[in-house]
Amino acid sequence: MDAIDRRILAALQRDGRLTVTDLATEVGLSQTPCARRLARLEAEGVIEGYSARIDQGRIGLPVSIFVWVELEKQAKDAIEAFERAVRGFDRVMECHLMTGSRDILLRVVAADLTDFDRFLEDKLMRVPGIRSTRSSFALRTMVRRQVLPVG
């Protein structure tokens, strides 16, 4: 990846709706080479897709909860089974396998405490292999970046 590829990525992170023409102008290329680079970055998986950033509070999900999960076993099959289960939960926005005394860190969104309680009882606590969970509620988001530092 060279400096032009990095400029393409930076421009698309600022505005994923740029046309190839506008993108080419912004990074100093003609359309065809820009389109080729863009297609290569997509094919290589550097660009994973395009989406809109949505304010979770404005769609009725203002609460973010971080849930630490400790599994009964840390074997590969147990971790994979947990991962398959949480992939089906639309309230789970992120799921990270962690080091340390807790195995998994989830970021969950909810409308309110009752909504989160329903999620815990009806979804998460029904996943086999969980030893314990601990939840922390975010009071406010102080920093949220969607743009990676591409240089």
Image: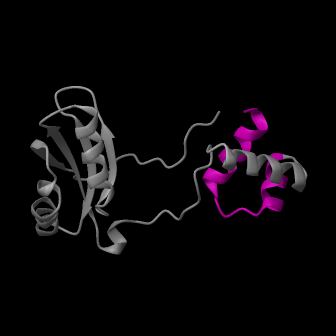
Q: Is 72 within the magenta?
A: no
Residue at 13% from the left image edge and 44% from the top image edge: 129
Give the farthest residue toward the top: 100
Q: Is residue 89 left or right of residue 131?
A: right
Quadrant of the rendering where the C terminus is positioned = top right
Q: How is the image coloured?
A: one colour
Magenta segment's dominant SS is helix
Q: Is residue 13 left or right of residue 67?
A: right
Q: Is residue 30 left or right of residue 100?
A: right
Q: Nearer the viewer, residue 76 or 120?
A: 76
Residue at 11% from the left image edge and 55% from the top image edge: 125
Residue 26: where, in percent of width, then height? Answer: 80, 51
Residue at 25% from the left image edge and 42% from the top image edge: 105
Give the farthest residue toward the front: 77
Q: Nearer the viewer, residue 97 or 128?
A: 128
Residue 12: where, in percent of width, then height? Answer: 66, 53
Quadrant of the rendering where the N terminus is positioned = top right
Task: Answer with the quarter of the image where residue 88 lies.
Answer: bottom left
Residue at 28% from the left image edge and 62% from the top image edge: 91
Q: Is residue 29 left or right of residue 18?
A: right
Residue 102: where, in percent of width, then height? Answer: 18, 33
61 vs 42: above or below? below
Residue 127: where, in percent of width, then height? Answer: 16, 53
Q: Nearer the viewer, residue 79 or 17?
A: 79
Q: Is 13 within the magenta?
A: yes
111 vs 63: above or below? below
Number of marks drawn: 0
Looking at the rendering, the stretch of residues picked out in magenta corresponds to: 1-27
